[in-house]
Image: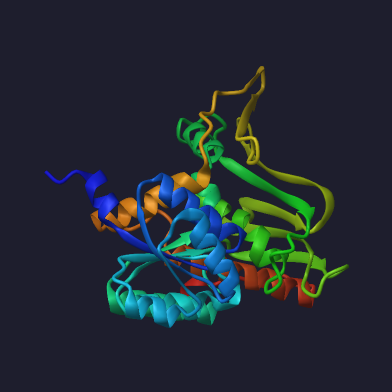
Amino acid sequence: MVDPRSLQENLKIGVVGVGAWGRNHIRVLKSLGVTISAICDVNEERARRVAREYGVEKYYVSLDEMIGREDLDAVTICTPSITHAECAVKALEVGLHTFVEKPLASSIDGCIKIIDAMNSSNRIVMTGFIERFNPAVRKAVELLETDEIGDVLMIHGRRIGWWPERVGDVGVVKDTAIHDIDLTRFILKKDPMQVYARGGRLFHELEDHVQAILSFENGLKAAFIEANWLTPRKKREMELTGSGGVISIKFLTQEVSLEKADMVIEPIVKQEEPLKLELQHFIECVSNGRRPMVDALDGLKAVAIAEAILQSMETGKVVDINLKSII
């Protein structure tokens, strides 16, 4: 039997985009024992500096040049959202497994181009929804699976804080709220049917605050998603309200609490870095030929729901969501 660790160590990966988050990819991949053969960034000085800092032998300013010269197995893409589709399609067309940070692409059309390239290349595409790998989320899902709060009736996700200056190509819906868009689908195991949203732009070129209500199952289940780039104190929280109790999740501190009629329980959550768990999963999928737990279709659905939220914000009306029509 082949040792999975040896498969992992033999993988050759390239990292595309080595700004703040790309540097985290490099750090984590090296800690996992993966060979980073090359990195790529349009800023040559940054690419040179990061390569030197992390001991990566080769760096490029052109993705075409990197994938043309290097013998890679996979890439992780950490570039601006509007470039995700172009970068991912290029990687897939030369046969590379591809991890794309959220959002999968900045538009539905971009997501579809990635999926078409994935199907043609028969390679894996994983969307970077890191919160699925947060130990607090995993603990909350365990509690749901043991029926601790009965049927989930309402989810309230809250992501507020200052504008992250690294983001300039998408607004708060596709950059921030999209995490909770994905988590509601993941937790409820269903797609929303309608959305009503309010929000707008106060201090930024694109929308910087949103409040959205997603309706599931003809109104029997719902999710309220709140996100902004305006509030001075950063919060990342979610409450799952069920027929028999409430589960509260604090993403930043990886804490979970369970409230029932006669008690409040705070289960122990083993602290782990979500990015490390996420990239480990991608590597295992590439090594073993498995479909990732969060794939390109999940990425497409999240972007489609985000665009429905933006449409509702613009029109002030309820917008129907028909994901089957775009798949």
Between residue 257 and residue 276, name the one nearer to us: 276
Left or right of 102, for residue 113? left
Residue 84, percent across and down? 52, 74
- Residue drawn at the location 52% of the way across and 37% of the way down: 135
- Residue drawn at the location 57% of the way across and 69% of the way down: 303
Between residue 247 and residue 178, name the one nearer to us: 178
Q: Residue furthest right?
A: 202
Between residue 302 and residue 320, name the one nearer to us: 302
- Residue drawn at the location 64% of the way across and 55% of the way down: 219
Question: Colour mode?
Answer: rainbow
| Quadrant hosting residue 201 | bottom right
Residue 257 showing in the rendered view: yes
Between residue 90 and residue 152, name the one nearer to us: 90
Residue 113, percent across and down? 44, 81
Residue 187 showing in the rendered view: no
Left or right of 178, for residue 38? left
Query: Please, is residue 269 above or below residue 49 in the view?
Result: above
Query: Please, is residue 253 above or below residue 16 in the view?
Result: above
Residue 294, percent across and down? 44, 57
